[in-house]
Protein backbone atom coordinates (compact mmCIF):
# COMPACT_ATOMS: atom_id res chain seq x y z
CA UNK A 1 0.00 0.00 0.00
CA UNK A 2 1.39 3.43 -0.93
CA UNK A 3 1.82 6.00 1.82
CA UNK A 4 -0.89 8.17 0.24
CA UNK A 5 -3.36 5.26 0.19
CA UNK A 6 -2.54 4.53 3.83
CA UNK A 7 -3.23 8.18 4.73
CA UNK A 8 -6.61 8.11 2.95
CA UNK A 9 -7.76 5.13 4.99
CA UNK A 10 -6.49 6.34 8.38
CA UNK A 11 -8.49 7.97 11.11
CA UNK A 12 -7.37 9.85 14.19
CA UNK A 13 -9.28 10.33 17.45
CA UNK A 14 -9.24 13.54 19.45
CA UNK A 15 -11.69 13.66 22.32
CA UNK A 16 -15.15 13.28 20.74
CA UNK A 17 -13.78 13.96 17.25
CA UNK A 18 -12.82 11.56 14.48
CA UNK A 19 -10.47 12.99 11.86
CA UNK A 20 -10.06 11.55 8.38
CA UNK A 21 -8.71 12.55 4.99
CA UNK A 22 -11.15 14.60 2.89
CA UNK A 23 -13.57 13.15 0.38
CA UNK A 24 -15.97 15.06 -1.91
CA UNK A 25 -18.91 14.83 0.51
CA UNK A 26 -16.97 16.05 3.55
CA UNK A 27 -15.53 18.96 1.55
CA UNK A 28 -19.06 19.92 0.49
CA UNK A 29 -19.99 19.97 4.18
CA UNK A 30 -17.04 22.27 4.96
CA UNK A 31 -17.99 24.57 2.10
CA UNK A 32 -21.37 25.19 3.74
CA UNK A 33 -19.59 27.20 6.45
CA UNK A 34 -16.05 27.96 5.15
CA UNK A 35 -16.94 31.43 3.78
CA UNK A 36 -19.10 32.39 6.78
CA UNK A 37 -17.93 35.74 8.27
CA UNK A 38 -17.68 34.06 11.69
CA UNK A 39 -14.99 31.79 10.17
CA UNK A 40 -13.23 34.32 7.95
CA UNK A 41 -12.97 37.11 10.54
CA UNK A 42 -9.42 36.08 11.52
CA UNK A 43 -8.19 34.55 8.25
CA UNK A 44 -5.85 36.07 5.69
CA UNK A 45 -7.46 34.06 2.88
CA UNK A 46 -11.01 35.01 3.64
CA UNK A 47 -13.21 33.87 0.77
CA UNK A 48 -12.33 30.71 -1.16
CA UNK A 49 -13.64 29.49 -4.48
CA UNK A 50 -15.52 26.23 -3.74
CA UNK A 51 -14.33 24.41 -6.86
CA UNK A 52 -10.71 25.46 -6.28
CA UNK A 53 -10.77 24.39 -2.62
CA UNK A 54 -12.30 21.03 -3.49
CA UNK A 55 -9.68 20.44 -6.18
CA UNK A 56 -6.83 21.49 -3.85
CA UNK A 57 -7.97 19.26 -0.98
CA UNK A 58 -8.58 16.24 -3.18
CA UNK A 59 -5.19 16.78 -4.84
CA UNK A 60 -3.63 16.81 -1.36
CA UNK A 61 -4.46 13.11 -1.07
CA UNK A 62 -1.60 12.41 -3.48
CA UNK A 63 0.76 15.07 -2.12
CA UNK A 64 3.02 13.95 0.75
CA UNK A 65 3.81 17.59 1.52
CA UNK A 66 0.19 18.71 2.08
CA UNK A 67 -2.17 17.03 4.54
CA UNK A 68 -5.80 17.97 5.15
CA UNK A 69 -7.96 16.36 7.83
CA UNK A 70 -11.71 16.66 8.28
CA UNK A 71 -13.03 16.49 11.85
CA UNK A 72 -16.42 14.96 12.59
CA UNK A 73 -18.46 14.99 15.77
CA UNK A 74 -21.01 12.23 15.41
CA UNK A 75 -22.01 12.69 11.75
CA UNK A 76 -21.41 16.44 11.56
CA UNK A 77 -18.30 17.90 9.91
CA UNK A 78 -17.25 20.42 12.56
CA UNK A 79 -13.64 21.41 11.81
CA UNK A 80 -10.64 21.02 9.53
CA UNK A 81 -6.90 20.92 9.99
CA UNK A 82 -4.19 21.51 7.40
CA UNK A 83 -0.47 20.76 7.55
CA UNK A 84 1.98 21.78 4.83
CA UNK A 85 5.62 20.68 4.81
CA UNK A 86 8.49 22.86 3.62
CA UNK A 87 12.26 23.16 3.77
CA UNK A 88 13.94 24.66 6.81
CA UNK A 89 16.54 27.37 6.40
CA UNK A 90 20.10 26.29 5.74
CA UNK A 91 23.31 27.25 4.09
CA UNK A 92 23.31 26.17 0.47
CA UNK A 93 26.93 24.99 0.48
CA UNK A 94 26.17 22.40 3.19
CA UNK A 95 24.11 19.23 3.06
CA UNK A 96 20.77 20.43 1.68
CA UNK A 97 19.10 17.18 2.72
CA UNK A 98 19.70 18.20 6.34
CA UNK A 99 16.97 20.84 6.09
CA UNK A 100 14.81 19.58 3.22
CA UNK A 101 11.11 19.00 4.04
CA UNK A 102 11.73 19.04 7.78
CA UNK A 103 9.32 21.77 8.93
CA UNK A 104 5.60 22.40 8.67
CA UNK A 105 2.94 25.00 9.16
CA UNK A 106 -0.50 24.18 10.54
CA UNK A 107 -3.90 25.78 10.63
CA UNK A 108 -7.39 24.79 11.72
CA UNK A 109 -10.94 26.02 11.16
CA UNK A 110 -14.09 25.34 13.16
CA UNK A 111 -17.71 25.52 12.00
CA UNK A 112 -19.22 28.58 13.78
CA UNK A 113 -22.05 26.41 15.13
CA UNK A 114 -19.46 24.33 17.00
CA UNK A 115 -17.04 26.99 18.22
CA UNK A 116 -16.11 27.35 21.92
CA UNK A 117 -16.22 23.58 22.45
CA UNK A 118 -12.47 22.91 22.33
CA UNK A 119 -12.55 21.45 18.82
CA UNK A 120 -9.91 23.84 17.45
CA UNK A 121 -7.41 22.72 20.10
CA UNK A 122 -8.19 19.06 19.54
CA UNK A 123 -7.65 19.39 15.79
CA UNK A 124 -4.41 21.35 16.29
CA UNK A 125 -3.15 18.64 18.66
CA UNK A 126 -3.75 15.97 16.00
CA UNK A 127 -1.88 18.09 13.46
CA UNK A 128 1.13 18.24 15.83
CA UNK A 129 0.92 14.49 16.46
CA UNK A 130 0.88 13.91 12.71
CA UNK A 131 3.84 16.25 12.20
CA UNK A 132 6.08 14.92 14.95
CA UNK A 133 4.97 11.39 15.81
CA UNK A 134 4.18 10.15 12.30
CA UNK A 135 6.01 12.34 9.80
CA UNK A 136 9.14 12.87 11.93
CA UNK A 137 9.36 16.61 11.32
CA UNK A 138 11.63 18.76 13.45
CA UNK A 139 9.64 22.01 13.77
CA UNK A 140 6.05 23.22 13.36
CA UNK A 141 4.84 26.81 13.21
CA UNK A 142 1.51 28.62 13.17
CA UNK A 143 0.52 32.24 12.82
CA UNK A 144 -2.47 34.38 13.71
CA UNK A 145 -3.61 37.95 14.19
CA UNK A 146 -2.58 39.08 17.68
CA UNK A 147 -6.19 40.03 18.45
CA UNK A 148 -7.33 36.46 17.80
CA UNK A 149 -7.15 35.53 21.47
CA UNK A 150 -8.87 32.16 21.04
CA UNK A 151 -6.28 30.95 18.54
CA UNK A 152 -3.40 32.25 20.64
CA UNK A 153 -4.74 30.33 23.67
CA UNK A 154 -4.93 27.12 21.62
CA UNK A 155 -1.33 27.42 20.43
CA UNK A 156 0.01 28.31 23.85
CA UNK A 157 -1.89 25.48 25.54
CA UNK A 158 -0.25 23.06 23.09
CA UNK A 159 3.17 24.26 24.22
CA UNK A 160 3.92 26.40 21.20
CA UNK A 161 6.25 29.31 21.87
CA UNK A 162 5.55 32.89 20.78
CA UNK A 163 8.54 33.60 18.55
CA UNK A 164 7.52 36.82 16.88
CA UNK A 165 5.12 39.62 17.64
CA UNK A 166 4.88 41.81 14.52
CA UNK A 167 3.53 45.33 14.81
CA UNK A 168 0.88 46.21 12.20
CA UNK A 169 2.06 43.32 10.04
CA UNK A 170 -1.14 42.34 8.24
CA UNK A 171 -4.04 44.21 6.71
CA UNK A 172 -7.50 43.34 8.00
CA UNK A 173 -10.35 44.44 5.73
CA UNK A 174 -12.53 45.67 8.63
CA UNK A 175 -9.93 46.67 11.24
CA UNK A 176 -7.02 48.06 9.23
CA UNK A 177 -3.39 47.18 10.00
CA UNK A 178 -3.18 44.65 12.83
CA UNK A 179 -0.38 43.05 14.80
CA UNK A 180 0.52 39.42 14.15
CA UNK A 181 1.92 36.52 16.14
CA UNK A 182 4.10 33.62 15.04
CA UNK A 183 4.31 30.51 17.20
CA UNK A 184 6.49 27.41 16.87
CA UNK A 185 7.44 24.21 18.63
CA UNK A 186 10.31 21.75 18.14
CA UNK A 187 9.94 17.98 18.15
CA UNK A 188 11.79 17.63 21.47
CA UNK A 189 9.59 20.30 23.05
CA UNK A 190 6.49 18.47 21.84
CA UNK A 191 7.74 15.22 23.41
CA UNK A 192 8.37 16.99 26.70
CA UNK A 193 5.07 18.91 26.66
CA UNK A 194 3.06 15.82 25.75
CA UNK A 195 4.46 13.86 28.70
CA UNK A 196 3.67 16.66 31.21
Image (spheres, grey):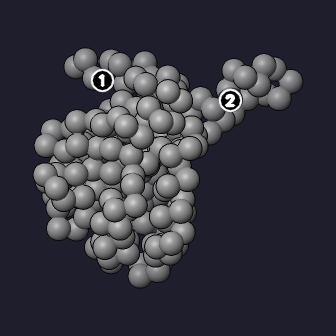
Whether residue 94 is visible, yes or no, is: yes
* Residue matched to label 1: 193
Q: Secondary structure at mark 1?
A: helix
Is 50 rendered above or below residue 75? below
> From what the image shows, is residue 146 above or below residue 122?
below
Q: Is residue 137 left or right of residue 110?
A: right
**Residue 26 percent location from the top left of the image:** 33, 59
Q: Residue at x 57, y 38 (%)?
A: 64
Q: CA distance from mark 2 to mark 1?
A: 25 Å
Nearer to us in this view, 110 or 67: 67
Which residue is disc 2 drawn over?
A: 100
Near mark 1 (Cα within 10 A), the count class, few <14, some 14-19 or many ≥20, is some
For numbered disc 2, what is the local secondary structure? Answer: loop
Which of label 2 and label 1 is nearer to you? Answer: 2
Name which quarter of the figure residue 89 lies in. Answer: top right
The disc label shown at residue 117, or none: none
Q: Position of residue 38 (x, y in %)?
A: 28, 73
Q: Nearer the viewer, residue 12 or 155?
A: 12
Q: Residue at x 29, y 43 (%)?
A: 19
Towards the viewer: 100 or 152:
100
- Side of 165 where 102 appears, left or right: right
Say above or below: 163 vs 1: below
Give the percent coordinates (x, y) of residue 109.
33, 58
Which quadrant of the figure contains the C terminus? top left
Farthest bottom residue?
174
Amino acid sequence: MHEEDHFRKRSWRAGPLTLTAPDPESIDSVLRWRNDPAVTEWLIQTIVDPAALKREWLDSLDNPLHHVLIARHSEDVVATGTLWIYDGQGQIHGDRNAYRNCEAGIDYLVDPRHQSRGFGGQVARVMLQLAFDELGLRRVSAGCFADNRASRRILEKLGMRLEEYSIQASWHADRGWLDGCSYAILAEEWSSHRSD
